[in-house]
Image: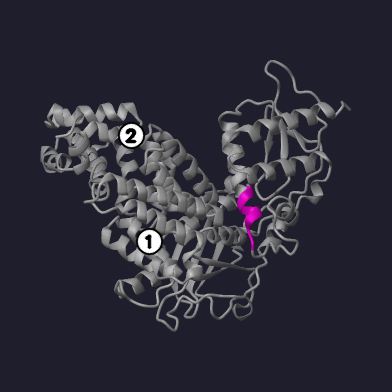
Amino acid sequence: MSDPAPQSEAILTALERLLAWPEIARSPQLGRFLAYIVQRTLEGNENSIKAYSIAVDVFGRPTDFDPQTDPIVRVQARRLRALLDEYYQGPGLGEVMQIQLPVGRYVPEFTALPEPGGPIAERDAPGVIERQGDGRRLSAPWFALGGLALGLAVAAIAFSGWWRNAPDAAGAVQRPTVTVIEFQNLDTSDTPPHVAGLAIELVTDLQQFGDIEARYSAGGDDEEVIPPTSDYVLTGIARPEGGIVQYSAILTEGRTRSVIWSHTLSVTMDAAMAPEVMDMVSRSLSLVLGSPRGPLHVAARRYLASTTSGEAGLNAYLCRVLFDLYRESGGASEAERASACLAALPEADRGSAVAVAAAAILLSEQPDATESAEPLINRRRLAAAELERAIGLDPLSGFVWEQQARLHEAVGELAQARADFSSSVQLNPASVDALAAYARLLAFGGNLDEAEAMARDAVEGSPNPPPWYQGVPALLALRGGDFAQAATHAELYAQADTELGPILAIMAAQGSGDSAVVSRYLPQVLGVATFRAQGILPRLRERIGDAQLMDAIRAALVKAGVPTAALIRAF
């Protein structure tokens, strides 16, 4: 046996590099989390790394911490896991000693890669995995079912404090409640696909939205496991079919048991045998269920469509739905209604992180068109302060981080916006609005490849995606030479983005030779107030960091007949 001390030193050096990486350094909680689990493992105390000890020792939760009602450890573990993967695929690529956090567990693994040009030495530090070619060896015992058992304990949620998705005494719809029942595995073979624990993943994912109350049930008689006030029930099966596994989910209305939504995902058998499949399936389902336009929020949207802006009895949940309606359209009337709803909330609700963040971004995005620049600057300063306060109130809210990202994007602080969007999607990977907004920022910044998967998830995973989702698909179609598809996306996008949408439509029309579309959108470009005040290209440079895209836009506008003066200065 070689001395384990050098390996421990290598692990501590790898830890130091991770803690110094800006993406982790900017989140002291994640840094403490990572240092805690690494130190405990090196001390040989990996069996003491539990959700309870992490919550109390790292996140400052009280000794009566209840993992059944507070998912902070699971959420932060997911965020840390994503950052570790990002680091070792980027700045840490090729590091000899790597620290990983396996899915479903809180005990880290230490992976020793071969030195360039040399063999792998014997590894004796706790939990070190040797890798050479396709082989691996664990030098310390790990318990594969430990993560699943811990997850089951976390998800044994008591059925108390249920909300009803029906009009209350004041006539307002409340936050929807959904009971998620363990999926049935119809594979009777000796090696069935992973299904157990999928309901836990779904409850954890849905809870991150804040406007959904998700509860867990192990299954059994409906009267025993489903509270009578549960608005919805989500059940499902996993069924093998040839070389694939069909994961089917069914959402029923709680009182009538009528089916209101169903969805099936096809997964290869090999993928279904990997523990990561539960994360993947849960996220895919949550993209739809958690969407503002998903089936869980239909009742609220119908209710709001039947009320007026002065209707009494609105609550914090309905204010959030009104905000989502504004986000889809960007309209002044929707903004006014959402702002009025938030302002009328009781003080306790008005002071919540979500309400503070929503009110702040509304303030920054809806200035009076006739006011001078200075009041807008003041509004944005006030919004920035309020968003900082919201993050202090709830640093684990993906919604709050998304709004701060949008403000940073609006004021041209694009690097900070990217960091905030990254935090948002790490905290809630199934938030379609955050994914679409982040993808748009990346695409216009010259990172179209990185944006592609996010944009696809947002457009394909969300029911009835709003027009502002279509910018990245338009760019992707333009790059691929599919000008008909690019025109379809661009004309939709033009409804939401009066600056870039018409320009992308012109570029698509030029590619397909459709001069009528060029003629239709060119006056719209020349009529944009910000273009007239600054010049077209100076204004676009505030939004677009991709030099190649800017060159393509310049060429397209020149070809369309835009005067040179209008391109470079006010006109």
* Residue at 55% across, 81% down: 228
133 inside magenta stretch: no
For marks 1 and 2, the one nearer the N-term is 1
- As helix, strand or loop, the secondary structure at mark 2 comes to loop
Q: Amino acid at mark 2?
A: Ile
Name the main secondary structure of what is drawn in magenta: helix
User: Which residue reaches farthest bottom?
Assistant: 169
**Does residue 265 appear in the picture of this structure?**
no
As for residue 74 lying within the magenta part, the answer is yes
- Residue furthest right in the image: 1
Q: Quadrant of residue 18?
A: top right
Magenta stretch in the rendered image: 70-77
Image coords of residue 438 (percent x, y) = 42, 44
In the foreground, 401 or 556: 401
Identify the residue at image location x=56%, y=59%: 202
Label 1 vs label 2: CA separation? Answer: 27 Å
Residue 323 image label: 1
Q: Which residue is mark 2?
A: 544
Q: Residues within 10 Å of mark 1 (few under 14, many from 20)?
A: many
Residue drawn at (83%, 31%) of the image: 124
Q: Is residue 271 visible?
A: yes
Looking at this view, is 552 or 18 the one in front? 18
Closer to the camera in the image, 122 or 309: 309
Inspect the image, locate mark 1, and give the three-letter code of the amino acid beneath it. Answer: Phe
Counting from the top left corner in percent of width and height, residue 440 is at 37, 42
